[in-house]
Image (tube, coloured by chain):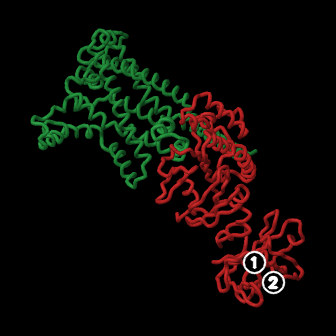
Amino acid sequence: MDDVSFDVEEGEFVTVVGPSGCGKTTTLRMIAGLEEPTSGNIRIDGEDITSLPAFERDIGVVFQDYALFPHKTVAENIAFGLKMRGKSEAEQQEAVDEMLRIINLEGYDDEYPHECSGGEQQRVAVARALAFDPDLVLMDEPLSNLDKKLRQSMRTELKRIQKETGVTTIYVTHNQTEALSMGDHLIVMNNGRLEQLDEPKSAYREPSTPFVADFLGQSTRLDGVFKQNGSGPQVRVGNVDLTVLERPDVESGDDVAVFLRNELVRLSESELEGDNTFPGSIRDVDYQGSDVNFFVDLPALGTSVQVSAVNGTPEAALTEGDDVWLQVAAKDLIYVAS
Amino acid sequence: MSTPNTSVGAEVSRIKNRLAEHRYLRLLVAPGVGLLWVTFFLFAPLGIIVLFSFYGAGEYGAIVQEFTLANYERFVANPIYHTIIAKSFGIGVVTTLIVLPLGYSLGYFLARSDTKYKPLLLGLVVVQFWVPIIIRTYAWISILGRRGVVNQILMMGSIITEPLQLLYTMHGMLIGLVVSLMPFMILPVYSAVSTIDDDIIQAAKTLGASDARAFYEVTLPLSWPGVVSGILFTFIIAAGAFIAPQLLGGPGERMIAPVIADVFLRDFNWPFAAALSLIYFLLIGVSLYIFTRKADLEEALEGTAL
């Protein structure tokens, strides 16, 4: 871990995203009290909890494998946090009833975890972490063990539950779709470092580091040098000058990484007009159903560029070997200092 | 149809029939071999013992094959046998009560620790099984004796002036029993605890359970099957212990197994020995039945649905 610092507002839903091994789970575990940071501190509501052991922190955790108590019923699992805090049986039952209602599993009181489906277990794990009204809830890739359809419906469920309970949530995932769709704010991590903290839209449209630009969305990366002269702001990639928009933080002569987002590159069989137009031919086709990814060789750039077409458009019907034209508007060209 | 054809055909179908029968027999025997084994080596000897307990004892070890209750009457009439049986049962219980916390702790820490010495430590526990119990017990003589290791160290350290009488006492025998039975508790507990997912214990902690409460609420119930196994093994062996009382116990530590052996081998009174065996067998059997019923009941209440 390398100097990771951030603030989270109360009631916020923050996602932490990054590739495996980037330190996001470690960060989560340190907040939960399951691991000790070598330096720095953790504060909730201004109170420093860094030296508190896990069981004295008021933080709920949802584990990737749910970690439900196999020898306890659903109700006992959910009530556990309250039981540890000495709440009466009546209070426990009330909380259990409320949580079961929120997660839509009313009547499951006496079921055992192994009698429930994956999605149900997941919801019980969430209910258990929320039942004792914690200051903060941490979720460690809770949806990664579910199949795609279930993941999608659980995503909506989790957002709804978080809105209804209003509890501050930090959600860790390596899935960028979840990261973009679920959070009020997004934290991108890589190699133990915090790359960017922003709203999902801003992080996607204005990535602040090459890693973030590459990690979110699908794009082709080109490396070049920014130059500002009589012809306006440009990036020289190989033998070609790409027209771009000015950025306040990049100066003439800086090395930059240029990112062409698949969906922002225009594709056509006929010649296109505008900035940054290139002829090429389709080398490879990656059929995805709702869209198609093409790998197009551009002789001018000496490399191939990814571009996507949506199912139903005429471009989606193109195949390998077809000659095409690509064009990227200056405003759609993302580049960052590298 | 010419005659040669018919005879060949008939021959073939005869062979086929025998093969089919054979295979059917083979299928029948396959699981049955296990059944035969158990019948031969368990039920038959037990049956013989039951039978013999109702025979009379004749002169010079002869067995009078007439139905009699004399052996049981002799048992009832002689309180010394009651004492010995009660004592043996009691030693079984005491040994188990000592082994339980010690063995559980070792099994627990072995399972939960992450040291690179884990395989070595496990190996040390298992290795004890390779050494026959009589040798393991015999070794205690040189440790606990008047000129044994313990006394020598205590004397050298000037902690005592006279050697302690550790051998041929209850303490000596218990030490020998406890140490030789530890693996029977350590291994099942180790096995049970190591199957407990660490995440579950950590989840308990994040929900507000201190280390002690996490142990009580999660680890202990989930390791319960291992504990029950350990208790069963330890108690059965300790209650019927033969070698430890013989080698390490004194005349005050008479246990039922050596007594039965004496009645068999010294008195040649097979019927009476059989009766004593059967009585103790039933006592242990009933106790274990009650224990497992109670243990299972607790398991059911805890909800271990596995």
Q: Could you tell me which secondary element the residue under label 2 belongs to?
A: strand
Residue at position x 38%, y 48% from top? B122
Colour given to chain B in the rendered image: green
Q: Position of residue A277 (x, y in %)?
A: 82, 83
In the figure, A22 relative to A334: above or below? above
Q: Which residue is mark 1?
A: A305
Q: Which residue is mark 2?
A: A278
Q: Position of residue A282 (x, y in %)?
A: 80, 78
Q: Position of residue B66 (x, y in %)?
A: 36, 11
Residue at position x 65%, y 72% from top? A209
Q: Quadrant of residue A267?
A: bottom right
| Image side of residue B150 versus residue B31, left or right | left
Q: Report the quarter where the C terminus of chain A lies.
A: bottom right
Tell me if label 2 and label 1 are in contact, CB under 8 Å: yes
Q: Quadrant of residue A183?
A: bottom right
Q: Earlier in the sequence, mark 2 or mark 1?
A: 2
Q: Amino acid at mark 2?
A: Phe
Colour given to chain A in the rendered image: red
Do we see residue B10 in this rendering?
no
Residue at position x 59%, y 66% from top? A190
| Image side of residue A308 versus residue B169, left or right | right
* Crowd class of label 1 (few under 14; some 14 to 19; many from 20; radius 10 Å): many
